Image (spheres, helix red, strand yellow):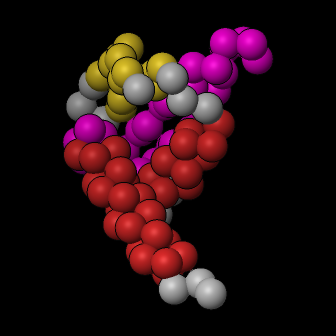
């Protein structure tokens, strides 16, 4: 996975994630919406055959990089919990 920042301002971050698909993009987009500082969170694919999600994250003035990093940490925590629960399935 390779992340490239395309645009960055005080309250907006536009970046693309090479090597990922809609699955990861949807998870990140939805988790960002759980942050009260997020005004907009979404992604798009410029072409259906080129699976490089481009994200747009806008905050109410807080640092969008920190918001993305926090969302990723929450996703990691949820994934670890899911793995632990899966181990208990008989």
Residue found at x 54% / y 76%: 86
Count of numbered circles in the view = 0
Depth check: 41 or 74 in front?
74
Depth check: 75 or 55 in front?
75
Q: Position of residue 42 (x, y in %)?
A: 57, 38
Residue 36 falls in image quadrant? bottom left
Q: Does residue 35 sit above or below 20 in this rendering?
A: below
Depth check: 80 or 71 in front?
80
Residue 9 falls in image quadrant? top left
> What range of the chain is rendered magenta?
38-65
Depth check: 10 or 70 in front?
70
Residue found at x 63% / y 43%: 23
Q: Is residue 12 left or right of residue 31?
A: left
Residue found at x 61% / y 32%: 21
Q: Position of residue 48 (x, y in %)?
A: 76, 17
Q: Is residue 42 left or right of residue 74?
A: right
Q: Does residue 66 sit above or below 1 in this rendering?
A: below
Q: Position of residue 77 (x, y in %)?
A: 35, 66
**Residue 47 in view here:** yes
**Residue 14 in view here:** no
Q: Is residue 88 left or right of residue 26?
A: left
Magenta segment: does it hold 59?
yes
Residue placed furthest toward the right: 48
Q: Position of residue 51 (x, y in %)?
A: 64, 20
* Quadrant (top left/top right/bottom left/bottom right) for the N terminus: top left
* Quadrant (top left/top right/bottom left/bottom right) for the C terminus: bottom right
Residue found at x 36% / y 29%: 13
Residue placed furthest toward the front: 90
């Amino acid at each position: 996975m390779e992340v490239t920042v395309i645009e960055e301002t005080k309250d907006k971050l536009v970046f693309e994630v090479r090597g990922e698909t809609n699955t990861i993009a949807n998870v990140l987009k939805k988790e960002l919406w759980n942050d009260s500082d997020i005004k907009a969170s979404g992604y798009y694919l410029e072409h259906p055959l080129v699976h490089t999600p481009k994200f747009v994250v806008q905050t109410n003035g807080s640092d969008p990089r920190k918001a993305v990093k926090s969302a990723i940490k929450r996703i990691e925590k949820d994934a670890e919990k899911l793995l632990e629960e899966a181990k208990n399935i008989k």
